[in-house]
Image (cartoon, rainbow, N blue to C red):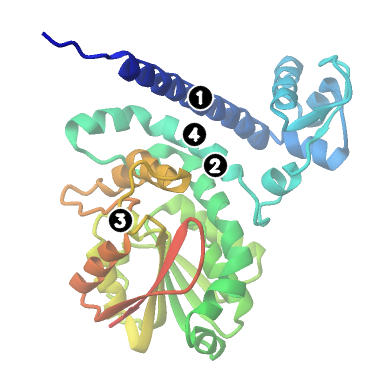
């Protein structure tokens, strides 16, 4: 009779369990702190300190018109988290100030380090979560509107800094000939435009360009129109609520068609790409910016891949399954997957563009 020594295996299992328990606690801590960040953002608490200087709890409550007791509790949590500083140990009477980095990450929406949109994801998913739980049983989709206005806030906040800082300065120069086309006065269709910042930045940089931005979400288009007016380009940027697959229906032809961080969300990505191809003027091109999923699945993945994969479960795939005959790809759209979609849509070739970004990959599609 032989026996097997299970001591090593048991020790390994316990170590793995302990490490995983620590990881789960860290995730819960991060989620809890993101909720407090969202409260500080939506109620203007960071801004009240940033614009008027260090303040006590009573002074912050007075500046914001919020309940004093809640404000003090929030201030204490922010100081303990290291997001605010405090000049003593009395949470009620000592003064709080912004910690280094807070102005860039939470107060300046055009800063390349702005990250307030991450905090808005949590309440957005919270709105939709009961439907998401049921969707796993029924197979139904979860509409974008179920995520509430926080979904639009999150999308706008997360993407705007990249468009403001990188679209014209880095991305367009990396696409051969695109700068010249835009400089001459191209007609551009920005499909899945959201709050419109990609279209707006194009119009600001290229005075001869005319941009039509299309999205099927009314709240996003309302924000896009307001943003265009505030940025002084409403005379050259038009935003419409429209089914993207019908972009070519009215006969308008475009020199450039763009899909910025949206193709993987569509219920019918092949139809969307087909419509884009049909809407091209002779010599036109389609530019796609989508998620930088690893070319081949690596499990476990790094933090970027973990974030993308989780977002596909709770955000992108449910929204794309609203149509009963959905063919949504989900967030993990790899280069080979994009090539397959483009081929089905009638494109002859796909170039992966030489743009280095931790979250996004860029493509040029040729008819």
Q: Secondary structure at mark 4?
A: helix
The residue where tag 1 is placed is 28
Tell me which corner region of the image, top left, top right, bottom left or bottom right, holds residue 48.
top right
Residue 122 badge: 4
What whole-number distance in Å separates the C-alpha atoms at marks 1 and 3? 29 Å
- The answer for how far apart the CA atoms under marks 1 and 2 are is 15 Å
The mark that comes first in sequence, 1 or 2, is 1
Q: Is residue 119 left or right of residue 354?
A: right
Residue 283 position in % (x across, y down): 36, 90
**Which numbered circle lies on residue 296?**
3
Q: Earlier in the sequence, mark 1 or mark 4?
A: 1
Q: Nearer the viewer, residue 67 or 8?
A: 8
Q: Residues within 10 Å of mark 2 (few under 14, many from 20)?
A: some
Are the residues tagged 2 and 3 within 8 Å (C-beta)?
no
> Which of marks 3 and 1 precedes in the sequence?
1
Q: CA distance from mark 4 to mark 2?
A: 8 Å
Disc 2 marks which residue? 118
Q: Nearer the viewer, mark 3 or mark 4?
A: 3
Q: Residues within 10 Å of mark 1 (few under 14, many from 20)?
A: few
Above or below, 330 against 269 in this view is above
Give the SS element for disc 2.
helix
Name the mark on residue 350: none
| Tag in front: 1 or 4 | 1
Work out whether 45 lies above or below 254.
above
Q: Quadrant of residue 191?
A: bottom left
Horizontal and vertical percent position of residue 335: 32, 64
**Mark 1 near mark 3, Cβ–Cβ under 8 Å?**
no
Q: Residues within 10 Å of mark 4 (few under 14, many from 20)?
A: some
Distance in Å between CA atoms under marks 1 and 4: 12 Å
Q: Residue at x 81, y 30 (%)?
A: 85
């Amino acid at each position: 009779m032989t026996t097997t020594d299970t001591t090593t295996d048991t020790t390994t299992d316990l170590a793995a369990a302990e490490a995983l328990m620590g990881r789960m606690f860290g995730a819960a801590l991060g989620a809890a702190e993101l909720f407090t960040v969202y409260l500080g953002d939506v109620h203007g608490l960071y801004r009240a300190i940033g614009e008027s200087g260090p303040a006590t709890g009573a002074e912050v409550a007075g500046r914001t018109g919020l309940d004093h007791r809640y404000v003090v509790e929030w201030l204490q949590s922010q100081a303990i988290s290291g997001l605010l500083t405090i000049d003593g140990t009395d949470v009620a009477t000592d003064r709080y100030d912004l910690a280094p980095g807070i102005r860039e990450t939470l107060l300046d929406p055009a800063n390349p380090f702005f990250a307030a949109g991450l905090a808005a994801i949590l309440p957005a998913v919270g709105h939709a979560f009961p439907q998401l739980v049921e969707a796993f049983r029924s197979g139904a989709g979860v509409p974008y509107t179920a995520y509430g206005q926080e979904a639009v806030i999150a999308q706008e906040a997360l993407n705007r800094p990249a468009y403001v800082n990188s679209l014209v300065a880095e991305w367009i120069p990396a696409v051969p000939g695109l700068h010249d086309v835009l400089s001459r006065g191209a007609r551009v269709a920005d499909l899945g435009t959201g709050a419109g910042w990609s279209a707006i930045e194009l119009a600001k940089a290229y005075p001869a360009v005319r941009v039509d931005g299309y999205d099927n979400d009314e709240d996003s288009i309302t924000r896009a129109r307001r943003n265009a007016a505030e940025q002084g380009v409403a005379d050259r940027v038009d935003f419409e609520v429209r089914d993207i697959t019908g972009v070519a229906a009215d006969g308008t032809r475009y020199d450039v068609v763009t899909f910025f961080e949206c193709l993987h969300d569509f219920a019918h990505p092949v139809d969307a790409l087909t419509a884009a191809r049909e809407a091209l003027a002779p010599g036109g091109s389609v530019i796609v910016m989508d998620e930088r999923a690893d070319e081949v699945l690596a499990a476990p993945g790094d933090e970027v891949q973990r974030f993308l994969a989780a977002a596909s479960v709770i955000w992108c795939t449910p929204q794309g399954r609203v149509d009963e005959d959905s063919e949504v790809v989900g967030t993990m759209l790899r280069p080979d997957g994009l090539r397959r979609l483009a081929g089905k849509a009638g494109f002859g070739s796909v170039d992966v563009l030489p743009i280095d970004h931790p979250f996004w990959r860029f493509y040029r599609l040729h008819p």
